[in-house]
Image: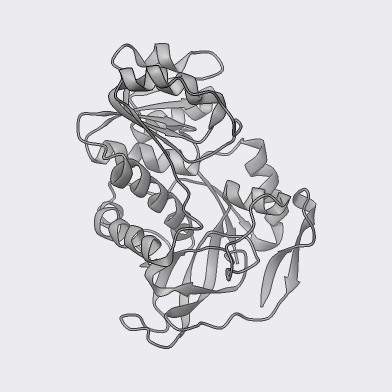
Amino acid sequence: MRAITIKEPGGPEVLTLAEVPDPLPGEGEVLVEVAATAVNRADVLQRQGFYNPPPGASPYPGLECSGRIAALGAGVSGWAVGDEVCALLSGGGYAEKVAVPVGQLLPAPKGVGLVDAAALPEVTATVWSNVFQTCHLRPGETLLVHGGSSGIGTMAIQLGKAVGAKVAVTVGSAEKLEACRALGADVLINYREQDFVEALGPEGADVVLDVIGAKYLDRNLDALAVNGRLVVIGMQGGIVAELNLAKLMAKRAAIVSTSLRARPLDEKAAIVAAVREHVWPLLADGRIHPVIDRVLPLAEAAEAHRLMESSAHIGKILLEA
C-alpha cells in the first residue's frame, strides 16, 4: 500500500508518499481500506518531531479515517467485510489501509458521504468527551469556544446549540465570524479587535473550550462564570503560565486538561460509544454536519499541512486516499 511517511522531523516537505507494507489486523481489530483521512494539528506536531505516536501505533500520521472494512481480526463480531465505517485512530490514517481496534470504529453516519465522514471521529470524540462528559455543559449555559472556525470549533458550536446552550466564539477574521454565525453561534468575537472577556459580559461562560493554553489562562479565568469549567485541549499559545489560585477559588471554578490520542483503549471505546449514542442521531437527522474546507489527494499532504499551519481554513481539511 501507499502511505505518507516522515523522512525526518521538519517542514511540510518531509512528508513523502511511499510504498510500505500492508498492516495486518490483530485480535480485536479490523482492517479498513481508507477512503479519506483528515488533517489535525497533532499531525503537524508529529511531523515536526514533537508528538510521537503511542507505543504500538502506526508510525504514519492521521488520527481518523473513513473507508470500508477489508478484513476482520480474530474475535471481532458485529462487523462485516464491506461495511462503510469511520474510525478514531492513534495513527496511520495517511495511508491506503489501517488496522483499527474495534472499539474505535463507528458506522458511517446516514446522510454523510463516505469521504466526508473522515471529518467526524476526532472532532466528535474531542468535543463530546470534553464539553459534555467532562464539563457537563447543560441547556441554558454558555459555552465559549476558542478557535470557533476550526474543525473542533465548528463541531462544538453545533453540538452546543443542539443541547440548548448559548455559544460564544473567538476567531480572527470577518469571514470566520460569518461562518460561525451560519452555524448558530450567538456571540461573535474577533480576538484581533475585541477582548473576549469584555465581549462576554459580566455573566461570563459556564464552560470554556480552549486550544490556546498558557497565553489565555488568566483571561479564561476572568471569563469563567461562578462554578465555571475550563478545559484545555491545546497549547498553541504556550505551555507555561502563572495561575491565580485566589481568582480560581473565588469563582469555585475548575480547570481540566485532556488529550485523546494516548488514552487507554477502553477509555477511547467508551468515548466512541457515547458519540455513537448521542451524536450520530444528530447527524442522521441533519441537525449537525461536518464542516469541510477542502479535499485534497493523499499525495498533496504537504500542501494540506501548509494550509493547516496558515490557519486560513474553515472546518476540516481532508486527504482522499
Asked whether 248 or 238 is in front, the reply is: 248
Judged left or right of residue 186, residue 97 is right
Rendered view: 241 above or below 52: above
All told, the count of numbered labels is 0
**Front residue (pair 181, 258):** 258
Percent of width and height locating residue 7:
79, 62
List x then y, in percent, for residue 295: 58, 54
Against 208, residue 98 (above or below) is below
The way the protein has been coloured in the rendering is: one colour
Q: Is residue 268 visible?
A: yes
Q: Residue at x 45, y 45 (%)?
A: 258
Rendered position, 14 above or below 249: below
Q: Residue furthest bottom?
A: 74
Q: Position of residue 137 (x, y in %)?
A: 26, 37
Is residue 204 in sight in this rendering?
A: no
Viewport quadrant of the C terminus: bottom right
Dividing the image into 4 quarters, which one contains the N terminus? bottom right
Q: Residue at image x 58%, y 60%?
A: 62
What is the quadrant of residue 225 in the picture?
Answer: top left
Q: Nearer the viewer, residue 276 or 286?
A: 276
Look at 42% across and 27% down and name the residue there.
169
Image coords of residue 165 (percent x, y): 25, 32
Horizontally, residue 200 falls left or right of residue 320, namely: left
321 vs 146, nearest the viewer: 146
Q: Residue at x 50, y 29 (%)?
A: 176
